[in-house]
Amino acid sequence: MVSAAFADRLTKKLVLFDVDGTLTPARQALSPEMIAALDDLRKKAIVGFVGGSDLVKISEQLSVNGSNAVDDFDYAFAENGLTAYKLGKPLESQSFIKFLGEDRYKPLVNFILHYVADMDIPIKRGTFVEFRNGMVNVSPIGRNATIEERLAFQAYDQKHGLRGAFVKALQEKFPDYGLTYSIGGQISFDIFPNGWDKTYALRHVEDEEFDEIHFFGDKTYKGGNDYEIFSDPRTIGHSVTSPADTIRILAELFP
Ligand code: M1P
């Protein structure tokens, strides 16, 4: 039986999607083809997204003609599920700063800002640390970078391993903080308490006792921010190479 919440749909299957690289190109909007595929899927399954970004950014990408993304998806999980909605209604969540405490946060952010200041990279923009509800996002180039500047940074980072070295320095400096450092996007990495990866979102769906939980993501390799939920025994993981690949697999699984 489906629960009262989903009584209009005769399905016990949940399909969850990562956002960047899976539903949309990084930081860009849904294509008309993806909108049609999701509309069709929502007739056959319960549908949600699990993004690493905050809800404002994800909403910019997933809203269709001014609609609200939290209404267009059955489950909306931003910041790995630390911000969570079910059928448009907010679910309880926790916060990064409550977990860490101001006294431990301050040395961490001070170290990060010093490290960024000392980095010699071709260009720097603004917003090097973004403080979110469930995590802190750190970007050596800065979050205000344009799409072109992002791509240039990503290529430069691939060559020089800047983010990897930054993460290593943080792990060595704060070994007892209980934090995970996740390089999930193009220009930044996320910092959150151990266990607050995308599997965090799964606790919000447990009560529905779904028969199958599918997860689609592009960063499903070890170290990628989709790895934990992709390989979790509670999910059936699908590794995709692009939004077009997501549409292709959906057509096979849900004809
Ligand atoms: O969803 C993946 C990542 O997307 C953004 O990363 P970047 O700006 O580096 O491309 C960030 O919102 C990050 O938090 C998130 O994990």
Image (tube, rainbow, N blue to C red):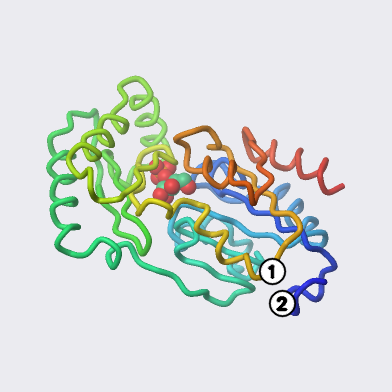
> Mark 2: is the Cβ under 8 angstroms from ligand 1?
no
Between residue 22 and residue 25, name the one nearer to us: 22
- Residue 42 image label: none
The residue lying at 52 percent from left, 53 percent from top is 199
Between residue 211 and residue 114, name the one nearer to us: 211
SS label for mark 2 = helix
Q: CA distance from mark 1 to mark 2?
A: 9 Å
Badge 1 vs badge 2, beta-carbon distance below 8 Å: yes
The residue lying at 13 percent from left, 50 percent from top is 110
**On screen, residue 150 above or below 192:** above
Estimate how packed mark 2 is, as few (under 14), some (14 to 19) or many (20 or more) residues with alpha carbons within 10 Å: few
SS label for mark 1 = helix
**On screen, residue 242 above or below 216:** above
Estimate how packed mark 1 is, as few (under 14), some (14 to 19) or many (20 or more) residues with alpha carbons within 10 Å: some
Task: Give the image location of residue 132, x and y in percent.
Answer: 34, 61
Between residue 114 and residue 221, name the one nearer to us: 221
Quadrant in which residue 241 is drawn: top right
Between residue 222 and residue 146, name the one nearer to us: 222
**On screen, residue 103 above or below 128:** below
Q: Amino acid at mark 1?
A: Glu
Task: Give the image location of residue 74, x and y in percent.
Answer: 66, 67
Task: Give the image location of residue 33, x and y in percent.
Answer: 73, 47
Q: Nearer the observer, disc 1 or disc 2?
A: 1
- Residue 208 image label: 1
Residue at the extreme bottom of the image, as rendered: 4
* Quadrant in the picture for the N terminus: bottom right
The mark that comes first in sequence, 1 or 2, is 2
Q: Amino acid at mark 2?
A: Ala
Q: Give the residue pinned by disc 2.
A: 5
